[in-house]
Image (cartoon, grey):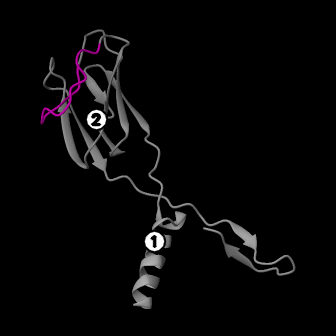
């Protein structure tokens, strides 16, 4: 019985340990330019949760719309920007609704996690050993 309670206590303490809780990376913003009726770059790798922005450098209006219909920037006029937030990992083909020959691909990967490194402190005032605090 004592072992059962000890196990539950250790489990409860471990669940709140900062070392066990990895931090999700901050979302990044990626820009794709629309120039001469082409998406530049036409293929880009991003992580789920990242923001993708399309900036129209052409005189003609454009869009960026997922082939699967999950998102659409709507009209992007000259000098304007459209954006979407990526959600699920996988290949996402997209196109311009006005100019179907304009195509691109988002390669969406799972976000990586980074844990916080432990902080070092002195175990005792006169001891020179260090131990992790996390």
Label 1 sits on residue:
12
The image shows residue 94 at horizontal and vertical percentages of 19, 33
Q: Nearer the viewer, residue 105 or 36?
A: 105
Q: Which residues are magenta?
A: 63-76
Neighbour tally class for label 1: few under 14, some 14-19, many 20 plus, Cα within 10 Å: few
- Quadrant assignment, res 124: bottom right
Quote the CA–CA distance across marks 2 and 1.
48 Å
The image shows residue 122 at horizontal and vertical percentages of 78, 74
Residue at the (32%, 53%) spot, across then down: 110
* Horizontal relation, residue 57 to residue 26: left or right: left
Label 1: element kind: helix
Instruction: Specify whether residue 7 is painted magenta.
Output: no
Find residue 42 and name its label: 2
Find residue 118 and name its label: none
Please identify the dominant SS of the magenta region.
loop
Residue at the (40%, 56%) spot, across then down: 112
Instruction: Specify whether residue 75 is painted magenta.
Output: yes
């Amino acid at each position: 019985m004592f072992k059962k309670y000890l196990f539950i206590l250790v489990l409860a303490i471990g669940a709140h340990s900062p070392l066990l809780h990895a931090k999700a990376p901050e979302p990044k913003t990626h820009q794709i330019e629309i120039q001469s009726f082409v998406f530049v770059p036409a293929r880009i790798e991003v992580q789920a949760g990242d923001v993708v922005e399309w900036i129209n450098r052409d005189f003609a209006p454009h869009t960026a719309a997922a082939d699967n219909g999950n998102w659409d920037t709507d009209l992007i006029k000259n000098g304007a920007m459209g954006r979407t937030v990526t959600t699920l990992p996988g290949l996402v083909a997209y196109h311009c609704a006005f100019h179907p020959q304009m195509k691109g691909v988002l390669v969406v990967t799972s976000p990586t996690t980074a844990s916080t490194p432990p902080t070092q402190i002195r175990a005792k005032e006169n001891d020179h050993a260090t131990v992790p605090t996390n």
